[in-house]
Amino acid sequence: MDKKSIDTDRIIQMAWEDRTPFDAIKAQFGVSESQVIKIMRSELKSSSFKLWRKRVTGRKTKHSATRSFEKGRFKSYDQNKYKQD
């Protein structure tokens, strides 16, 4: 598996996580929220993409500026499986 597909898989996983803000994805991969949406649209089935968009639209935890807490889990429980080179 090449680095690009590993990164894409990880971006998709982080995008599905409720507590991972888009800012964390940008910090780790340099991918903006609009780019994440494009990745999700191209990589997911149409029904899965619609479900994801419905889930994250308006969700405060996906946008750092609207989160009600300053500190939280930045990394998922399995973050250590994915090493940055």
Image: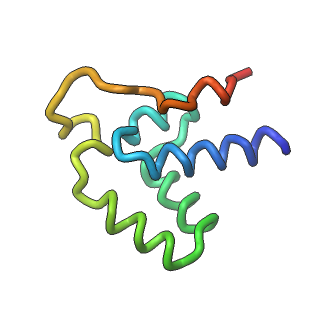
Q: Indicate whether 12 appears above or below 27.
A: below
| Residue 81 located left or right of residue 61 | right
Identity of the residue furthest to the bottom in this view: 47
On the image, the x and y values in percent for residue 84 come to 68, 23
Name the image quarter holding residue 4.
Answer: top right
Q: Measuring 61% from the left and 42% from the top, which residue is drawn there?
A: 10
Give the colour scheme of this rendering. rainbow
Q: Measuring 33% from the left and 68% from the top, which residue is drawn there?
A: 54
> Number of callouts in the render?
0
Identity of the residue furthest to the right in this view: 1
| Residue 80 located left or right of residue 49 | right
Q: Indicate whether 61 appears above or below 28.
A: below
Identity of the residue furthest to the left in this view: 68
Q: Indicate whether 77 appears above or below 32.
A: above
Q: Measuring 20% from the left and 36% from the top, which residue is drawn there?
A: 67
On the image, the x and y values in percent for residue 72 come to 30, 25
Which residue occupies the foreground of this view, 55 or 35? 55
On the image, the x and y values in percent for residue 58 come to 22, 57
Q: Indicate whether 57 appears above or below 65.
A: below
Q: Measuring 47% from the left and 44% from the top, which residue is drawn there?
A: 32
Name the image quarter holding residue 24.
Answer: top left
Specify the quadrant that holds the N terminus: top right
On the image, the x and y values in percent for residue 6 come to 72, 42
Specify the quadrant that holds the C terminus: top right
| Residue 42 located left or right of residue 70 | right
